[in-house]
Amino acid sequence: MEIYEAIYGRLSVRSFDEKKDVPKEIVDKILEAGCQAPSAGNIQPWRFWVIRNPELKAMISTAALNQRYILEAPVIIIICADLNASAEAYGKRGRELYSIQDAACATENILLAAYSEGLGACWAGAFYEEDVTNALDLPSHIRPLAIVSLGYSSLAGVKPDKMPIEDVVEYVD
């Protein structure tokens, strides 16, 4: 798939075919794409938790303000940042900014790769971090930053309009 096709075609999917599983090989391929994201100093602080367990998905869905589609997706991926990895190289700025930016880049790669594989996905950022941390028993230096639900879409989606560049760009010569 050509990159612009993926960028312009990708949309958030919140309705999944619960009967159609996503093979591990495809999930791994998508995660490999996540690992190709840029990162400050090539630290690569992203860490991924792949969840299929229904009980754990229910806990994550509850932590994510009861967003039901998270529970219904065959696979959810929790994208985390290893704060210590970035802090070792960049101190406070690495811990508080670079690790988050790096994980966001990996998340976007995951979303684009999922679309390229014919899957639907949705990035959820609204969740109680402490609840997700507890559900996954994460160490204190691992911060959950995004939840990506992943599966085959059960409905045709409509991509919302995006702002034109004239509304968001300033050229400084």
Image: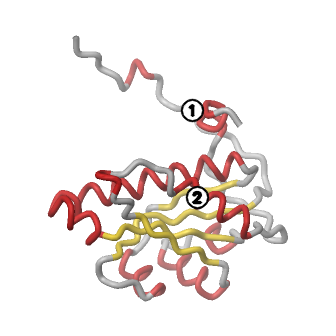
Q: Nearer the viewer, residue 165 or 172?
A: 172
- According to the picture, the residue beneath numbered tag 2 turns out to be 32
**For the point 42% across and 54% down, which residue is it?**
104
Residue at 58% from the left image edge and 58% from the top image edge: 32
Q: Residue furthest right?
A: 19
Crowding around mark 2 (Cα neighbors within 10 Å: few <14, some 14 to 19, many 20+) is some
Measured as percent of width and height from the top left, residue 58 is found at: 60, 82
Q: Quadrant of residue 15?
A: bottom right
The furthest residue to the left: 92
Q: Position of residue 12 (x, y in %)?
A: 61, 50
Looking at the rendering, which quadrant does residue 11 occupy? top right
Q: Nearer the viewer, mark 2 or mark 1?
A: 2
Looking at the picture, the colour scheme in use is: secondary structure
What amino acid does circle 2 point to?
Glu
Q: Amino acid at mark 1?
A: Asp
Quick check: 5 left or right of 134?
A: right
Residue drawn at x 69%, y 68% as measured from the top left: 73
**Position of residue 117 measured from the top left corner of the image (x, y, whole percent):** 73, 51
- The CA distance from mark 2 to mark 1 is 30 Å
Residue topped by disc 1: 161
Q: Residue at x 50, y 57 (%)?
A: 35
Name the quarter where the C terminus is drawn. Answer: top left
Mark 2 lies on a secondary structure that is: helix
Residue 172 coordinates in the image, percent (x, y): 23, 15
